[in-house]
Amino acid sequence: MIALLRRCGAIALAALCWQAVAVRASDVPYVPTPMNVVDAMLVLGGVGPGDYLIDLGSGDGRISIRAATRFGTPGMGVDIDDRLVRLAQAEAQKQGVAGKVAFAARNLFDTDLSRATVITAYLLHSVNLRLRPMLFEQLKPGTRVVSHDFDFADWPPDQKITIDVPDKVYGPPRSDIMLWVIPANFAGVWQWSLPGSPVYEARLEQKFQMLVGAAMAQGQPLSLAAAQVKGDTVSFTLNGAAGVQRYSGRIDGNVISGEVVPRSGERTLPWRAERIKTGTINIGGM
Ligand SMILES: C[S@@+](CC[C@H](N)C(=O)[O-])C[C@H]1O[C@@H](n2cnc3c(N)ncnc32)[C@H](O)[C@@H]1O
């Protein structure tokens, strides 16, 4: 009898432990994104047939399925809950896009994101913060990340809209939709020259997509302002005694190619800068 009780106790304990593990594995409860928000997320993300969309925590699959049916976008969704994954697969089949979108029962933190050109998420702040380093590690510059209601703390969105959601199941009847574009790494020391001008040297520091720095030409300091990074493109101005120069270009490895307006009203010239020392992007802590 005692042996039986012991055995039952062990089984009950095992069941309890299993439940605790199962509960802990889901980081976010299932709450579907209302369809008008889904549509606004896809429009803000600029999705198209050339994209590959991964929805992290895909629930009933509505974001991936809508991307495929309305925009012709292939992709996948992952969810920890295999019941929801089966539901999403059945819905994709029903809507005729099972060949375009796949769903997998998987922890989003064990998912290879490198193929994505668009990531969508309706998670929680704490989960987004854990996800943030993974996005910077795995995603190509230019990849768009669209989140419903939850941001990435001190990583500011590139764009944010708020829309009315009369049928929202909790909270105020509106949703924030935010877009981030994964920035290329512009940090480091760059050099270039312009026809008839000395060598320019700029030292750039980057936190997320925010770029600050200072530049010198012939020992004279130039202030660097209005720096903007979007994916693999950059623009900034250099302000000195001779006026304001406006630069814009695209990075490829350790080279930026683009153009410069050397002074207001002057002819645009080609611009090519080389990085002589690479820096790292500051992506904050967790
Ligand atoms: C708020 S719902 C969003 C569902 C869907 N993306 C939408 O917007 O309609 C969050 C989803 O994340 C799933 N989830 C929670 N933790 C997860 C994890 N670690 N890995 C994968 N999915 C997870 C939940 O099962 C749930 O379906």
Image (cartoon, helix red, strand yellow):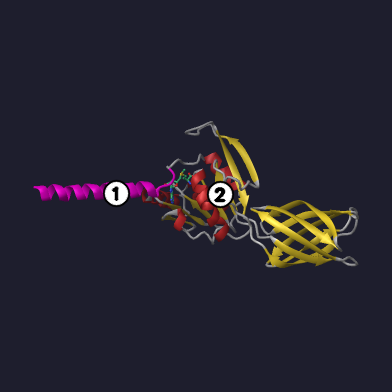
Q: Residue furthest left?
A: 1
Mark 1 residue type: Cys
Horizontal and vertical percent position of residue 78: 45, 53
Element type where label 2 sits in the image: helix
Q: Which mark is residue 104?
A: none
Residue closer to the observer: 168 or 102: 168
Q: Is residue 246 above or below residue 173?
A: below
Asked whether the viewer can see residue 122, the reply is no
Horizontal and vertical percent position of residue 146: 57, 48
Element type where label 1 sits in the image: helix
Residue 23: say if magenta.
yes
Asked whether the viewer can see residue 160, the reply is yes
Q: Is residue 248 above or below residue 160?
A: below
Q: Residue furthest front?
A: 219
Judged left or right of residue 237, residue 41 is: left
Residue closer to the observer: 244 or 260: 244
Q: Is residue 257 above or below residue 135?
A: below
Horizontal and vertical percent position of residue 243: 89, 53
Judged left or right of residue 147, residue 280 is: right
Mark 2 residue type: Arg
Q: State whether label 1 is within 8 Å of ligand 1.
A: no
Q: Main secondary structure of the magenta part?
A: helix
Q: Which mark is residue 70?
A: 2
Q: How many residues crowd mark 1 within 10 Å: few (<14), some (14–19), many (20+)?
A: few
Circles 2 and 1: CB atoms closer than 8 Å = no
Q: State whether label 2 is within 8 Å of ligand 1.
A: no
Q: Which mark is residue 17?
A: 1
Q: Residue at x 36, y 46 (%)?
A: 23
The part of the chain drawn in magenta is: 1-28
